[in-house]
Amino acid sequence: MESNSQGVKPDWRTHLALVVLYAGVLAGLILGLYHFEPEIFVLARQRGGSVPRDEVSRTERAIRCVKEFLVDQEQIGFTSDLSPVAHLSLYRQVQYSLAPILVADSLDETYIVAFYSSAPPQPPQNMEGYRLVQDCESGVMLFHKPGNP
């Protein structure tokens, strides 16, 4: 084994620290590739915009077109067609992005913000009685139940 500039050979702890460091970097790269969403980059470039780097910023950008309709609302509902884990993650991001509006993971509210990953988005059957208020053309839709304020 080679020695460093002072002529001292690294001990096993130094080697272990390097292995752990490299494993962490490799895990970060793998997770980054796993969560990479190329369609977001393509859509942003087609529209001449930049691409937010974090998920909360992407969520805020996605729901920007529905916020103006929700200014006077205290509580709204939320739904998506995502897996339970992805749904929960997105639900928390929407809660953060729309604060101080309370967002319930429910279809029992007057307004419902819906995220759909299918193309074209297909609202679920349990949205009967709601009318579409805004379609952001990015899988984000806002529904309102007529007769309610």
Image (tube, rainbow, N blue to C red):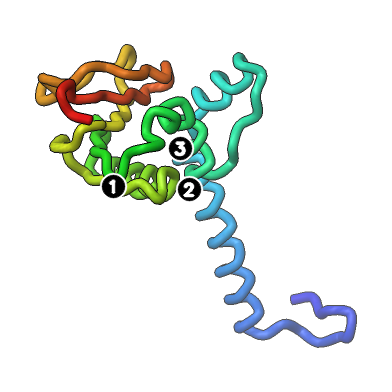
The residue under label 3 is which amino acid type? Thr
| Mark 1, secondary structure of its residue | helix
Q: In which quarter of the image is residue 122?
A: top left
The residue under label 1 is which amino acid type? Leu
Q: Residue beneath label 2, please?
A: 31
Q: Quadrant of residue 49?
A: top right
Q: Nearer the viewer, mark 3 or mark 1?
A: 3
Image height check: is 121 above or below 17? above
- 80 and 20: which one is in front? 80
| Mark 2, secondary structure of its residue | helix
Where in the figure is residue 71, as x and y percent of width and height? 40, 36
Q: Residue beneath label 1, please?
A: 88
Q: In this view, does 25 lie to the left or right of 9?
A: left
- The residue at the point 40 percent across, 50 percent down is 100
- 89 and 21: which one is in front? 89
Where in the figure is residue 92, as x and y percent of width and height? 35, 49
